[in-house]
Image (tube, rainbow, N blue to C red):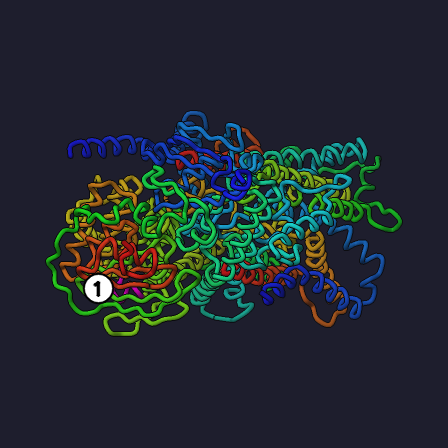
């Protein structure tokens, strides 16, 4: 019993501890690590991943998976770039709308046609990618700098990058939804035991549909920020985002089999994985050793490995109990 | 005076639930024929019967899992029909399943309140919900932190949570399906206190269990089902245990049954001891089980459902981990870590669940038949298909498997023929001992007789057979020796003329073989 | 008795029709595509067209062979692309003499190939170990190497492009054997071996038994964990070979790009080819046919003026359709 609690605590709080240690390490070792410029760069860049990971977090908590988030974001970026002349609001709406459509398609395939989430979202990943390339005529779509659109990704609000504000807001809402609405609790119940949830009278199908739509919408939003931040809609961006998002969610202690999860820890997971890259940059900047940037994926993989093994111990124990 | 009588005798209280003339057939095979069930207000009603007697179908009809073909249900004074278990729950009937149907990683509060959450300003009001959960649990004298996830608590507490959930949903009738199967004695007594409390607050309980002693502790009346019919209803205190067992099994206690199986007289010689198992224990279900098998002998393991027969047999085969006890095979210590080891030593095991643990549905008859034999059929990793065909055809012929040929997929065969293939899977490797768990379950009468004959032949040829069966005739007429298990302990060993229905039933009911009648 | 006979006969007859359709639907689809092209696509019937289409699918099918075996056990392998990158990164390090110097060029190439493919196989074995020892879901266990694997490849080459021009090595991607591209020969050989293994060998039986009913397989004495580890190891080996083919064609190794997105192509080929994604029923030739269908659909669309992006949409629809049909025929 006690060992269980320790492992559970480790897999849910461990990410915060690791994040704190990494920040402490960076602060002690590098000048300017906690400087305004570095912080705002890290936050601005990682806010896109944070949004995608938030949607993924909800999907995984129901016991599903969404592989289409990366190409959905790319699609969102292209669509919003095409409409960027119309200003920030329209650009955002169409980008998010494109994401929602992919999400609805996912929900339909998974809930109605009962196709495995893994395969269904694999197919929509291809479809979104194809659509993005088609709309973009196979090249990046420049964003109009005339209007307000670029402010979304490049602007600041009292020195805080706007994308970061959006991400924080999204996580705050996500956290409230998860913890203080019956829909949120249903998400966790379904992932924990779908049959039991049906028996308890929870609207299983509706909730499952909703998480995929949410994931699609948030990916679309991430795409809008991508376009606005880098000044172009990028049809071939987003490759591997889904796996980065899954890794963040898992490192954040959300159980991949569903049923246990935390929105806040997912954000910590995103920041942790993002900061590893940042720290590598600083380390190279010191010039003592030259660790290539490519170590980041190795380290990310090792993190994931560690967390997954920890989780497997926990679930095994729980099954034996 | 008359008034007092009414309030003191629950059996005269008005009827809460009445199910009459319930018929239900699955694919033309009747599961319920004119079954009935009546439960009074504040009554704890036992529902018992063998496997396939229809009690679970009855509950499924009541809770809206399946729709009955014909029949009338009235509940709390008006006609009742549940479209789904959720619907039944809304109308006041909650079910607590054997496999607890809750969400393990969520808190106790959530498990109690999911589906009817309390809100304030549109958001969940956790304080109020925790308080409600705490209150509900306190009714059972359980003081725990309701914020903690469910899996951190033991099965008994989890069950209390399920009951608390039912009460929270204002249930008038709570159905408990084998609630004590994974509880220890102390936990059982807590559960019974809770059931008595429910009763006092006017909530009725349908209690499904195979542990007869428990029924007497907590139930008022009993309904016994067999073959889809209600065969006996009555005050529990006026029915003896042996009568319960007799009605469940469809036997007249006094009458000596005529031969009902194909086993007949045995001619083979019983030889050396093959397997000795002593004081086995594992999990909740096996406490202290001992038995032995000689070559050329059919040994029956008898017992009611949940007595630990299958679980004990699996230990011999290395399919589950053993906690304690000793086993020896052919005089040598036998503690297999996995089935591979047991098979290498000449043990075969035909599982009670053909679909889940037996057949590989998409594989052919030949492939299924030779699955355990495969290592011997391969040369440098290549399956010798000539040799395989010879063996397969031999066994198809010997066992009379009806199929289009060795290449037909096993999923297309009837249950009886699938079973024959699975038996052949073990016979083909020429074992010393086979464990047959419910070898004739769910197959038609003709195939049943064939399989029984086959088992006899095998024993005559010198094979040791350990047979588990819920059919009393099969155990009594087929076995040379019978070990009776009761609640995880072996309580009797019978051989030769001692093997009578009365003796076996008495051991199943009381744990002693002296005849009650 | 005669009743029983006619009954089983009837059963057999009605079954044969569905069996025929499910068994040959992919081949029929391929035939239809070929016929369509014969009629509508100019210059379709030429050796060049054949070679173009076959070389396009060769790497996908080579990886798909391993993937088919993995899926047959009820698993999945997401790390194939990364393992291709690892193999593709290691081989040049050896035959270019960056890591070790072997002066005899043929020996050098041989060592390079063997070390590269074995390393990929070892990583595959690691996947299997994670899955069987910790009982981690395959999709997650292989995700670890999906992420870390490419990093390992990038780190070992410092992310640099390794260009080379070395006939002794590049025959694997550019050479011909009796007029047939060597990679196509490798593909056909692997398909043939795997199809034979699946049908005739003990190992194949064990794979299908595990995918068909893992509990029953365990109770029949099949060493489930060992078989699974081997299957993932084989998937690694196949990916390793595919990695070599890709860098040979490109005349360079780029750890960032080799095998990118390969897991999706391989899974798509397996799914369209008719292998049951839940395991227990698998066809390696089906995977070949599946890959050809996907390729030919693309080729057909492209050669008839439809943009490649639309072809992607069609591919997505194909996958969904194949899986949905599978569900229907099982229900």
Question: Farthest front residue?
Answer: B1
Q: Residue at x 33, y 34 (%)?
A: B30
Percent x, y for residue A294? 64, 60
Residue C85 makes an appearance in the image: no
Q: Chain letter of disc 1?
A: B
Percent x, y for residue A48? 72, 47
Taking the magenta stretch, the answer to whether it contains residue B346 is yes
Q: Residue at x 45, y 66 (%)?
A: C111
Residue in front for this viewpoint, B13 or B60: B13
Element type at marker 1?
Answer: loop
Residue in front for this viewpoint, B342 or C138: B342
Left or right: where C220 falls relative to C55: left
Percent x, y for residue C129? 47, 62
Question: Farthest right residue?
Answer: A158
Q: Quadrant where the C terminus of chain C lies?
A: top left
The residue indicated by pointer 1 is B432
Taking the magenta stretch, the answer to whether it contains residue A79 is no
Q: Which residues are magenta?
A: B342-349
């Amino acid at each position: 019993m006690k060992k269980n609690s320790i492992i559970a605590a480790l897999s849910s709080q461990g990410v915060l501890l690791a994040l704190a240690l990494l920040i402490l390490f960076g602060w002690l070792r590098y000048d300017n690590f906690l400087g305004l410029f570095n912080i705002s760069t890290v936050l601005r860049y990682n806010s896109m991943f944070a949004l995608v990971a938030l949607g993924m977090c909800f999907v995984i908590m129901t016991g599903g998976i969404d592989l289409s988030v990366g190409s959905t974001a790319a699609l969102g970026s292209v669509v919003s770039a095409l409409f960027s002349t119309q200003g920030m609001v329209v650009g955002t709406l169409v980008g998010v709308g494109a994401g929602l459509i992919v999400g609805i398609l996912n929900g339909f395939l998974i809930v109605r046609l009962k196709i495995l989430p893994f395969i269904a979202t694999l197919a929509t990943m291809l479809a979104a990618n194809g659509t993005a390339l088609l709309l973009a005529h196979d090249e990046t779509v420049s964003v109009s700098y005339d209007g307000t659109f670029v402010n979304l990704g490049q602007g600041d609000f009292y020195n805080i990058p706007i994308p970061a504000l959006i991400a924080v807001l999204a996580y705050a809402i996500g956290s409230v939804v998860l913890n203080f609405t019956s829909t949120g609790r249903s998400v966790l119940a379904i992932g924990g035991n779908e049959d039991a949830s049906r028996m308890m009278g929870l609207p299983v199908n509706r909730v499952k549909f909703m998480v995929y739509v949410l994931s699609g919408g948030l990916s679309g939003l991430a795409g809008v920020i991508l376009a606005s931040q880098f000044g172009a809609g990028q049809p071939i961006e987003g490759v591997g985002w889904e796996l980065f998002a899954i890794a963040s969610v898992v490192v954040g202690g959300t159980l991949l089999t569903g049923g246990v999860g935390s929105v806040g820890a997912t954000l910590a997971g995103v920041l942790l994985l993002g900061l590893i890259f940042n720290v590598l940059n600083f380390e190279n900047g010191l010039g003592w050793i030259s660790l290539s940037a490519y170590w980041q994926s190795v380290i990310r993989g090792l993190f994931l490995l560690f967390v997954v093994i920890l989780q497997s111990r926990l679930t095994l124990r729980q099954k034996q109990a | 005076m008359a008034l007092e009588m009414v309030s003191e005798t629950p059996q005269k209280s008005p009827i809460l639930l009445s199910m009459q003339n319930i018929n239900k057939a699955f694919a033309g095979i009747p599961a319920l024929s004119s079954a009935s069930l009546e439960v009074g207000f504040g009554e704890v009603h036992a529902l018992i019967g063998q496997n396939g007697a229809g009690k679970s179908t009855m509950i499924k009809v009541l809770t809206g899992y399946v729709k009955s073909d014909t029949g009338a249900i009235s509940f709390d004074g008006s006609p009742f029909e549940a479209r789904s278990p959720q619907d039944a729950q809304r109308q006041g009937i909650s079910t607590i399943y054997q496999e607890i149907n809750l969400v393990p990683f969520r808190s106790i509060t959530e498990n109690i309140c999911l589906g009817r959450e309390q809100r304030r300003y549109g958001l969940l009001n956790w304080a109020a919900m925790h308080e409600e959960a705490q209150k509900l649990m306190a009714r059972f004298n359980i003081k725990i932190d309701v914020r903690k996830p469910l899996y951190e608590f033991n099965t008994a507490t989890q069950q209390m949570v399920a009951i608390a959930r039912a009460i929270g949903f204002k249930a008038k009738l709570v159905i408990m399906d084998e609630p004590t199967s994974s509880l220890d004695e102390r936990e059982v007594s807590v559960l019974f206190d809770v059931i008595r409390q429910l009763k006092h607050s006017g909530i009725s309980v349908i209690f499904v269990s195979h542990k007869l002693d428990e029924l007497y502790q907590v139930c008022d009346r009993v309904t016994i089902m067999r073959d889809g019919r209600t065969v006996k209803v009555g005050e529990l205190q006026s029915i003896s245990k042996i009568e319960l067992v007799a009605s469940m099994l469809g036997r007249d206690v006094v009458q000596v049954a005529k031969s009902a199986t194909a086993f007949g007289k045995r001619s083979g010689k019983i030889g050396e001891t093959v397997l000795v198992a002593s004081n086995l224990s594992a999990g909740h279900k096996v406490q202290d089980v001992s038995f032995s098998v000689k070559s050329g002998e059919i040994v029956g393991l008898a017992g009611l459902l949940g007595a630990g027969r299958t679980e004990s047999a699996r230990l011999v085969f290395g399919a589950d981990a053993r906690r304690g006890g000793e086993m020896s095979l052919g005089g040598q210590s036998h503690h297999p870590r996995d089935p591979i080891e047991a098979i290498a030593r000449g043990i075969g095991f035909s599982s009670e669940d053909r679909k889940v643990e037996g057949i590989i549905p998409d594989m052919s008859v030949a492939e299924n038949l030779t699955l355990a034999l495969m290592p011997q059929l391969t040369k440098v990793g290549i399956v010798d298909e000539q040799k395989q065909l010879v063996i397969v055809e031999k066994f198809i012929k010997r066992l009379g498997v009806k199929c289009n040929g060795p290449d037909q997929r096993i999923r297309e065969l009837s249950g009886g023929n699938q079973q024959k293939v699975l038996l052949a899977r073990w016979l083909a490797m020429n074992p010393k001992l086979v464990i047959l768990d419910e070898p004739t379950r769910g197959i038609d009468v003709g195939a049943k007789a064939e399989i029984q004959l086959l088992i006899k032949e095998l024993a005559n040829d010198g094979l040791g057979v350990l047979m588990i069966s819920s059919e009393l005739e099969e155990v009594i007429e087929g076995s040379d020796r019978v070990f009776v298990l009761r609640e995880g302990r072996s309580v009797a060993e019978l051989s030769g003329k001692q093997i009578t229905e009365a003796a076996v039933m008495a051991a199943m009911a009381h744990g002693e073989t002296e005849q009650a009648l | 008795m005669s009743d029983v006979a006619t009954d089983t006969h009837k059963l057999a007859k009605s079954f044969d029709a569905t069996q025929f359709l499910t068994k040959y639907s992919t081949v029929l689809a391929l035939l239809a595509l070929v016929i369509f092209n014969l009629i509508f696509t100019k210059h379709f019937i030429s050796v060049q067209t054949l070679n173009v289409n076959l070389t396009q699918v060769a790497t996908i099918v080579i990886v798909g062979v391993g993937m088919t075996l993995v899926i047959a056990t009820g698993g999945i392998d997401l790390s194939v692309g990364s393992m291709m990158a690892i193999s593709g990164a290691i081989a040049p390090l050896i035959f270019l003499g960056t890591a070790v110097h072997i002066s005899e060029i043929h020996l050098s190439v041989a060592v390079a190939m063997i070390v590269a493919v074995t390393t990929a196989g070892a990583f595959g074995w690691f996947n299997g170990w994670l899955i069987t020892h910790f009982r981690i879901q395959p999709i997650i266990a292989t995700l670890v190497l999906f992420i870390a694997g490419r990093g390992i490849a990038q780190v070992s080459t410092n992310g640099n492009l390794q260009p080379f021009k070395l006939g002794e090595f590049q025959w694997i991607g550019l050479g011909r054997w009796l007029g047939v591209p060597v990679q196509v020969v490798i593909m056909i050989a692997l398909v043939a071996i795997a199809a034979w293994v699946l049908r005739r060998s003990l190992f194949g039986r064990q794979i299908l038994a595990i995918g068909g009913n893992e509990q029953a397989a365990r109770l029949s004495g099949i060493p489930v964990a060992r078989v699974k580890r081997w299957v993932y190891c084989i998937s690694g080996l196949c990916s390793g070979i595919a990695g070599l083919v890709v860098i040979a064609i490109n005349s360079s190794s780029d750890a960032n790009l080799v095998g990118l997105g390969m897991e999706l192509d391989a899974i798509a080929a397996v799914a369209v080819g008719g292998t049951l994604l839940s395991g227990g029923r698998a066809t390696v030739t089906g995977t070949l046919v599946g890959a050809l269908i996907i390729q030919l659909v693309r080729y057909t669309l492209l050669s008839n003026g439809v943009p490649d992006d639309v072809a992607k949409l069609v591919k997505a629809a194909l996958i969904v359709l194949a899986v949905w049909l599978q569900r229907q025929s099982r229900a």
